[in-house]
Amino acid sequence: MKQTLLSLSNLSKQFDGKTVLDSLDLEILDGEFITLLGPSGCGKTTLLRLMAGFEHPDTGTITLGGEDLTHTPPEKRPLNTVFQNYALFPHMSVFDNVAYGLKMEKRPKEEIRQRVDDALAMVQLGEFARRKPHQLSGGQQQRVAIARAVIKRPKMLLLDEPLSALDFKLRRTMQVELKRLQRELGITFVFVTHDQEEALSMSDRVVVLKDGQVQQLGTPREVYERPANLFTARFVGDTNFFAGRVDVANGDDTITVDVFGLKRTFPKPDFQVAAGQLLHVLLRPEDIRVLAPNDDDGVAGKVVERNYKGSTLDSVIHLDDGTEVLASEFFDEDDPTFDYSLGERVKVSWVDGWEWLLPEENTETELEGAVDA
Amino acid sequence: MSRWLPRTYLTLVYLLLYVPILVLVVFSFNDSRSGYAWGGLSLRWYEALFNNRAMVQAMWNSLWLALSAATVSTVIGALTALALHRYRFRGKQVLNGMLFVVMMSPEIVLAISLLGLFLLVGLQLGYVSLLLAHVTFCLPFVVITVMARLSGFDERLPEAARDLGASDFTMTRTVLIPVIMPALLAGWLLGFTLSLDDVVVSTFVGGPSYEILPLRIYSMVRVGLKPEVNALGTLLLVFSLVMLMLSQWILLRSKR
């Protein structure tokens, strides 16, 4: 069991009367890669800045390994930051940028040289030591920023959307590289992003934030497959929401739910259910099965859109009651010509047990929050 | 035709700008006493200039005044610009606006009011009164130059320095000042130039104990211009060209 490294309790922060963080609690474990995920304005960057010490909370405490850091200035905190636009010192060479933290510790010259050389070698920038930041590409500047931030061997590295300025391919490379660095250094990484795919692929745990509150905290798999609420379900990946009504809450651990007039039996969810209650049945596009129109199972509809994605065929199906369904199917080796024509009649079903149930919520506010997802 | 018109126009503009300066330089080497006739090459006016002890003294006084006024106003101006940029405080807008008032108000108004102030507090007119006056009219230019540089300054840089263990003071020394150095230099040069050729304010707040060059030349013109003024003008021209090249060189080096 990993130990808690940084513990945030009851943190609140307001800017000009607007609440950015709302009595937030969070425990960050030693050595983990944890991602703060949320739409812009959800408070993720503010949370990171509170950890770094650039902002001070209105209420609450921050403790690192049992030591209270709440009012410690940034230069006295054993954690370092990689900034969104790198914030490299423009008047210093790459070497001096990376050496800055060690010079502040007044380390001997020889030690500084050795450690900077090692750090630059680690990010494969050995031969660029004499260059100025503006002579480097975006990806190289990013590596310098990382080398500069890890040179003091911090207990924790804070990364504020570090990959957002890079193009898609470079971003994928840097994602892999960051994971490798984190494994090699064994430092706790706190990573801020609004990119859910990035969050899922890189993290040990994901914190989904909205309006300064934690919506869900869990492994990428938990967040994706078992979202805690409608916001998380909408923000992380594409989701089909089907309206369901509880038909029978069986005494044992299953319930029968009426979805599109079909009676399906589900395991009992971990919230209270009663007969007649409305709920949401969540299905990811890849859980959907598209069947022939004469199949016994499923709900009838017609294909209104098809997108060839290389490895999958994504389609949008209009059910006869007006519901739109997103489906994503893998190509089958046995049927390489598999495709739909627009307007084709089909039936829609899913594999039993792959659905996820959520209680009815006041959906209007939820929709607002998910707009920029 | 259409090609000649812009060329002629451009030539005329440059002639208008540089012919007077060229005439001054050429006539500084003129052996004739008259300002209109050429009497052969000579360095006699340079000799006369350096033998004119009052003139040389006035030159040193002017240089020293410009140097100190530029330095003092750069220090105060840079701190003012930093305060205006970094902090939110009461009266910030007023302070900002007052700088523009000093810059926009006619020099003669500034001169009269400064003289009035100095007489009121009983300050003897001389180096100190000149310095205070020059710092006053140089200050807004320095503040505006530095503020312009700061507005493009990445706010994350000081944070990055603090994050890596620098105290506020060390951050200022190792990151903030080097980054705004070009603006400090530009502000200093601007102040130096403004101070060096100021006549109006200096006429009012200067005193006989500390004679400066522009006033000296001005008084000479009234009794009759001697060619040694040409020599002086040429020296000042060379001096400002050297200063200009030096500042450009420093700027280029800081960019690399």
Image: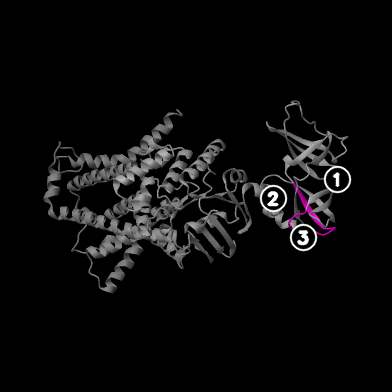
Label 1 vs label 3: CA separation? Answer: 28 Å
Q: Which residue is mark 2?
A: A226
Residue A136 at x, y = what percent?
43, 38
Percent x, y for residue B4?
42, 29
Q: Are marks 2 and 3 on the same chain?
A: yes
**The magenta segment:** A268-282
Tell me if residue A255 comes above or below residue B2 in the rendering: below
Q: Tell me the amino acid under the disc marked 1.
A: Asp
Quadrant position of the N terminus of chain B in the picture:
top left
Residue neighbourhood size for the residue with mark 2, other residues' Cα within 10 Å, grouped as few (<14), some (14–19), many (≥20): some
Residue A294, picture quadrant: top right
Is B66 left or right of A26, judged from the image as shown?
left
| Residue occupied by mark 3 | A272
What is the spatial separation of the Cα atoms under label 1 and label 2, in whole angstroms?
A: 27 Å
Q: Is A123 placed above or below A276 here? A: above
Task: Please say whether residue A322 is one of the residues in the magenta stretch.
Answer: no
Where residue A304 appears, x then y in whole percent? Answer: 79, 37
In the foreground, A135 or B115: A135
Which residue position holds label 1? A321
Q: Mark 3 is on which residue type?
A: Gln
Nearer-the-camera pick, B216 or B251: B251
Which chain is home to disc 1?
A
